[in-house]
Image (cartoon, coloured by chain):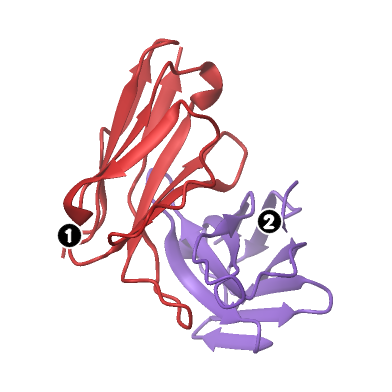
Amino acid sequence: DQQVKQNSPSLSVQEGRISILNCDYTNSMFDYFLWYKKYPAEGPTFLISISSIKDKNEDGRFTVFLNKSAKHLSLHIVPSQPGDSAVYFCAASALYTGANSKLTFGKGITLSVRP
Amino acid sequence: GAGVSQSPSNKVTEKGKDVELRCDPISGHTALYWYRQSLGQGLEFLIYFQGNSAPDKSGLPSDRFSAERTGGSVSTLTIQRTQQEDSAVYLCASSLRVTGNSYNEQFFGPGTRLTVL
């Protein structure tokens, strides 16, 4: 049973436009959410996170939105750049409720930014 | 500075053989995690070590899988009697000490690609 779902396997956007990557979760114990970025042949790298007490966190071109009632989060990248082309993983943790830092990941979405 | 390193980068083995995968975490990181990514899947948690505490083995898929962490640093993931479904990329991550009220970023290594023929 997938507890973190990224239902779209891929997304293609034009350089300069907004990229919106979506993620849904089912486990109500999750209280900390993260986005990781992965290039081929490399390990994932942390991008941005949000705790369940917030509904928005912004870091430069990257903003993560959390809708707890819908168990949905999204990553917005604006403006998108060709270097953003990578696989993006949504991950969740029961960090505060479960004192558990292990991450549950979605399957990832491949973002392609066209020049 | 040095990140998380893993060896080998690629391993091809025959069904039924045992394999050992190694992880060198970032110096000073007391928490260490193993994940694996099978084809078309997300990363799947396997096991977690923190300091001298008993490891969280709740993600290990069978008793053929085991891991140890010697001296609180290097970790070895061992898969006995490998099966074709064990083929995956095995990723190691480390972080500063985990507490109940703050998140410490997990830094990932490049992974070991295991292929079981």
Q: Chain of mark 1?
A: B
Q: Tell me what hue chain A is rendered in.
A: purple
Residue A111 in the image: above or below residue B66: below
Hey, which quadrant is residue A50 in on the image? bottom right
Q: Nearer the viewer, residue B89 or A100?
A: A100
Q: Which amino acid lies under the numbered mark 1 shown in the image of this protein?
A: Ala
Q: Which amino acid lies under the numbered mark 2 shown in the image of this protein?
A: Leu
Residue situated furthest right in the rendering: A70
Tell me if B44 is positioned left or right of B97 in this view.
right
Q: Position of residue B75 (x, y in %)?
A: 26, 45
Looking at the rendered structure, whether the residues under marks 2 and 1 are on a common chain is answered as: no
x 52%, y 66%: residue: A100
x 34%, y 47%: residue: B110
How crowded is the residue under tag 1: few (<14 C-alpha within 10 Å), some, or many (20+)?
few
Q: Position of residue B115 (x, y in %)?
A: 43, 22
How crowded is the residue under tag 2: few (<14 C-alpha within 10 Å), some, or many (20+)?
some
Q: Position of residue B89 (x, y in %)?
A: 44, 36
Query: Which chain appears red?
Result: B
Tell me if A105 is positioned left or right of B91 in this view.
right
Residue receiving disc 1: B2
Residue receiving disc 2: A11
The reply to whether residue A46 is visible in this rendering is yes
Hey, which quadrant is residue A91 in on the image? bottom right
Residue B113 in the image: above or below residue A66: above
The reply to whether residue A18 is visible in this rendering is no
Residue A54 in the image: above or below residue A91: below
Q: Position of residue A80 (x, y in %)?
A: 57, 71
Hey, which quadrant is residue A95 in on the image? bottom right
Q: Nearer the viewer, mark 2 or mark 1?
A: 1
SS for callout 2:
strand
